[in-house]
Image (cartoon, rainbow, N blue to C red):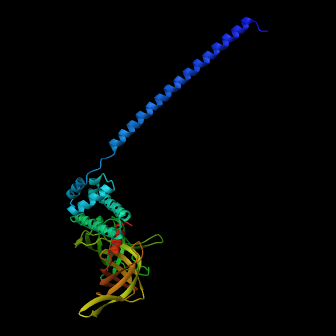
């Protein structure tokens, strides 16, 4: 049996030990609470700072009237300014003035408008009408932006500029400027409609026509100084010149392409009904092959073995990027080339949707 003093000592020791544990737990809980409160306060302060910073960095939405004034001060008409300001708000554009001053930014802005119209128009007819307005603004802006610009030397021709080479026999060949070096212009070696290289005698004199992508056209006289053919590339080297003749402004921008097309001979027939007469276009049902070499909203150039004359009407079927489309063209100019002809034609009947698709192809909006 345990002595009484030992029992008393054990109870006292146990009680003191239990009290120490409770005190330790209380201290731990208080420290935990302090840490938790500190962490919570720090989190709230951080979120408050982030919120204030975000608010200070987020630009305020500019009013449509202010956007219109900015566009008008940049040379746009009232109707154009209203159109652009409307979509600047829809697309939450904040650096509007910078966009209006920069050609590349402005073109990206118009491309965004194009896709917005495609996604948000209530009907297809509404979409095509809005796209037409958009492309009219795009062309008008290009006229204004580059009306006063000119070139003083072939050294200034931008790389990848499409060129039209014309020989002294009036044969036309489409090509592109691959490199503009100090020793000459290096252009892609032209091929005929069947993919074969055109044969040029050494020193061939050429008249070269080109547009700088902004309706400004130029003409130069030059000659072939070298022919470069390898497995990697095939080029003609043309002599530089400081004599450049400006051409009248082209109405529509155009794009160099290599696109298969189908051609149908067409005649105009007059149908009489009582006192009225109506003219209709009647086309053959058998397609003939052709290859488009450039395209614009106003017309096309194409290679074909089909023999035609200026004034002939042709139904043409091609794919500008969103499916096969039909249009009617009238031949304006004919050039004889190896194994066929190079034709330049204007559209005489084309639906608005196809015209808008051609614009989108030319400007790279597809």
Residue 13 sits in which quadrant?
A: top right
Q: What residue occupies the far right of the structure in this picture? A: 1
Q: Nearer the viewer, residue 355 or 172?
A: 355
Q: Nearer the viewer, residue 277 or 318?
A: 277
Q: In the rendered image of this protein, does residue 22 appear above or below residue 316?
A: above
**Left or right: 249 in relation to 365:** left
- Asked if residue 104 can be seen in this view, the reply is yes
**Left or right: 364 in relation to 8:** left
Residue displayed at 61% across by 15% down: 19
Q: Position of residue 128 (x, y in %)?
A: 33, 70
- Asked if residue 185 can be seen in this view, the reply is no
Q: How many marks?
A: 0
Quarter of the picture holding the N terminus:
top right
Quarter of the picture holding the C terminus:
bottom left
Residue displayed at 70% across by 11% down: 10
Q: Position of residue 334 (x, y in %)?
A: 31, 85
Q: Nearer the viewer, residue 124 or 15?
A: 15
Q: Position of residue 122 (x, y in %)?
A: 35, 65
């Amino acid at each position: 049996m345990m002595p009484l003093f030992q029992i008393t000592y054990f109870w006292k020791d146990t009680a003191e030990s239990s009290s120490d544990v409770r005190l330790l737990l209380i201290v731990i809980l208080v420290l935990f609470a302090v840490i938790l409160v500190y962490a919570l306060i720090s989190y709230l302060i951080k979120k408050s700072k982030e919120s204030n910073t975000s608010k200070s960095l987020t630009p305020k939405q500019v009013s449509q009237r202010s956007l219109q004034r900015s566009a008008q001060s940049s040379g746009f008409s009232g109707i154009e300014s209203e159109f652009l300001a409307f979509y600047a708000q829809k697309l939450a554009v904040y650096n509007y003035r910078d966009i209006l001053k920069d050609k590349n930014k402005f073109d990206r802005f118009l491309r965004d408008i194009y896709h917005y119209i495609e996604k948000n128009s209530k009907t297809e007819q509404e979409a095509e009408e809005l796209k037409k307005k958009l492309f009219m603004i795009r062309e008008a802006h290009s006229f204004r932006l580059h009306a006063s610009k000119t070139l003083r030397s072939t050294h200034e021709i931008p790389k990848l500029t499409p060129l039209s080479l014309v020989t002294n026999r009036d044969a036309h060949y489409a090509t592109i400027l691959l490199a503009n070096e100090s020793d000459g212009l290096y252009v892609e070696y032209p091929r005929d409609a069947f993919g074969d290289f055109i044969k040029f005698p050494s020193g061939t004199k050429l008249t070269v026509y080109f547009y700088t992508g902004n309706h400004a056209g130029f003409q130069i006289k030059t000659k072939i100084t070298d022919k470069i053919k390898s497995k990697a590339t095939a080029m003609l080297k043309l002599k530089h010149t400081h004599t450049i003749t400006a051409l009248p402004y082209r109405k529509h921008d155009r794009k160099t392409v290599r696109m298969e097309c189908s051609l149908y001979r067409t005649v105009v027939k007059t149908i009489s009904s009582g006192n009225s007469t109506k003219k209709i276009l009647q086309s053959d049902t058998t397609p003939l092959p052709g290859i488009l070499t450039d395209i614009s909203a106003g017309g096309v150039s194409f290679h074909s073995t089909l023999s035609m004359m200026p004034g002939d009407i042709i139904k043409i079927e091609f794919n500008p990027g969103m499916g096969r489309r039909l249009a009617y063209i009238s031949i304006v100019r004919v050039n004889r080339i190896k194994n066929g002809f190079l034709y330049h034609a204007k559209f005489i009947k084309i639906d608005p949707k196809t015209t808008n698709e051609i614009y989108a192809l030319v400007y790279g909006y597809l």
